[in-house]
Image (tube, grey):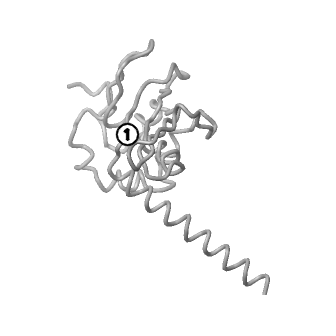
């Protein structure tokens, strides 16, 4: 009987977690976020703060990784606080829709985007980085993105042109 109860509790926990992930994906599909420089990272990386929006605070923290990579590829970020402005890796604004199948796979849970990102704040979010905005949370997470490796792999996949490939 105890085993049956443990199995039932485990199943409920897994179902709840799966539901939260689906909700997170819906929030991320819109890619609603703000990106700003958070300091100077190691060579070949950007250290950015990603402000993600979600109705559940924990969801915004996890989705910050996807949002950071998305921002580096498609938006870039403004210079501030001693940081220089950075342009998006993808110069063509249509590449996201033209290569939608690639990016759908790339940004799926556990997708290839995970190779290029790590959370720099060890999952600890300060009170200043957690704001209630209407019915949602706006969560700021510091993330390190390996932009050189990301660019190299996107070039190899034919998604973006190399820096040395002329105009």
Q: Is residue 143 visible?
A: no
Which of the 4 quarters of the picture holds residue 152? top left
Give the side of residue 33 with respect to residue 139, left or right: left
| Vertical order, 129 against 115 (above or below) | above
Residue 105's x, y, as percent?
Answer: 40, 56
Residue 21's x, y, as percent?
Answer: 49, 60
Pick out the residue farthest to the top: 82
**Residue where numbered disc 1 is placed:** 33
**Quadrant containing the N terminus in the rendered view:** bottom right
Q: How many marks?
A: 1
Mark 1 neighbour class, 10 Å CA radius: few under 14, some 14 to 19, many 20 or more: many
At horizontal 22% and vertical 49% (from top left) the residue drawn is: 98
Pick out the residue farthest to the right: 2
Name the residue nearer the viewer: 163 or 25.
25
At horizontal 51% and vertical 38% (from top left) the residue drawn is: 130
Name the residue nearer the viewer: 91 or 152.
91
Give the side of residue 137 with respect to residue 76, left or right: right
At horizontal 40% and vertical 32% (from top left) the residue drawn is: 35
Name the residue nearer the viewer: 110 or 9.
9
At horizontal 52% and vertical 43% (from top left) the residue drawn is: 115
Q: Is residue 87 visible?
A: yes
Residue 102's x, y, as percent?
Answer: 34, 53
Residue 69's x, y, as percent?
Answer: 42, 39
Task: Give the secondary structure at mark 1.
Answer: strand
Pick out the residue farthest to the front: 134
**Quadrant containing the C terminus in the rendered view:** top left
| Vertical order, 147 against 79 (above or below) | below
| Vertical order, 99 against 52 (above or below) | below
């Amino acid at each position: 009987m105890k085993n049956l109860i443990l199995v039932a509790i485990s199943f409920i926990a897994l179902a709840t977690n799966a539901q939260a992930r689906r909700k997170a994906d819906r929030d991320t599909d819109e890619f609603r976020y703000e990106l700003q420089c958070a300091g100077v990272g190691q060579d070949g990386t950007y250290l950015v703060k990603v402000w993600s929006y979600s109705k559940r605070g924990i969801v915004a923290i996890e989705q910050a990784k996807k949002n950071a990579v998305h921002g580096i590829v498609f938006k870039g970020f403004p210079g501030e606080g001693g940081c220089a402005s950075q342009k998006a890796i993808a110069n063509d604004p249509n590449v996201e829709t033209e290569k939608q199948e690639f990016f759908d796979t790339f940004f799926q849970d556990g997708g290839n985007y995970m190779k290029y990102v790590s959370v720099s704040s060890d999952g600890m979010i300060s009170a200043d980085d957690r704001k209630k905005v209407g019915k949602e949370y706006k969560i700021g997470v510091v993330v390190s993105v390996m932009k050189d490796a990301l660019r190299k792999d996107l070039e190899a996949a034919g998604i973006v042109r190399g820096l040395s490939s002329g105009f």
